[in-house]
Image (cartoon, rainbow, N blue to C red):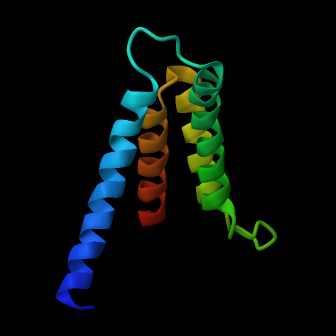
Amino acid sequence: MTIPQQIITIGVAVAAIVFTRFLPFTLFRSGRKTPSWVLYLGKSLPPAIFALLVIYCLRDISFSIGGHGVIQLISVLVTFILHIRHRNMILSIAGGTLCYMILIRI
């Protein structure tokens, strides 16, 4: 890539980042009511992303082979219990990850 191409690429990347950062502030100015679809996405996306993370983490586990997947299931259970008890996604994810990391080292 030549120097002018690099400059253009960096410029386009900066413009895209600035555009996406300032767009919400121009669309949803203070004093205006937040659209219902934005409120809906704010409520439904975090659990959906959390579920996708669980599916992604467990996708390659073969439970038919003896003993495989026990550590992962224990970690998912710890994550679930932490989330039900404390209702804090960061604590749930960190606790489940810590549990998994400890169990794979034993």
Q: Quadrant of the C terminus?
A: bottom left
Nearest to the observer: residue 41 or residue 96: 41
Residue at image point 25% right, 66% down: 11
Describe residue 17's horizontal placement relative to residue 80 as left or right: left
Residue at image point 56% right, 49% down: 75
Residue at image point 58% right, 26% down: 38
Residue at image point 60% right, 60% down: 57
Residue 50 position within the rendered picture, expressed as x and y whole percent measured from the top left? 59, 43
Nearest to the observer: residue 77 or residue 46: 46
As drawn, the residue found furthest toward the top would be: 31
The relative height of residue 72 versus residue 83 in the rendered view (above or below) is below
As drawn, the residue found furthest toward the bottom would be: 1
Describe residue 62's horizontal placement relative to residue 89 as left or right: right
The relative height of residue 97 versus residue 46 in the rendered view (above or below) is below
Describe residue 79's horizontal placement relative to residue 11 as left or right: right
Residue 29 position within the rendered picture, expressed as x and y whole percent measured from the top left? 40, 19
Q: Quadrant of the N terminus?
A: bottom left
To which quarter of the image does residue 23 belong? Answer: top left
Nearest to the observer: residue 97 or residue 26: 26
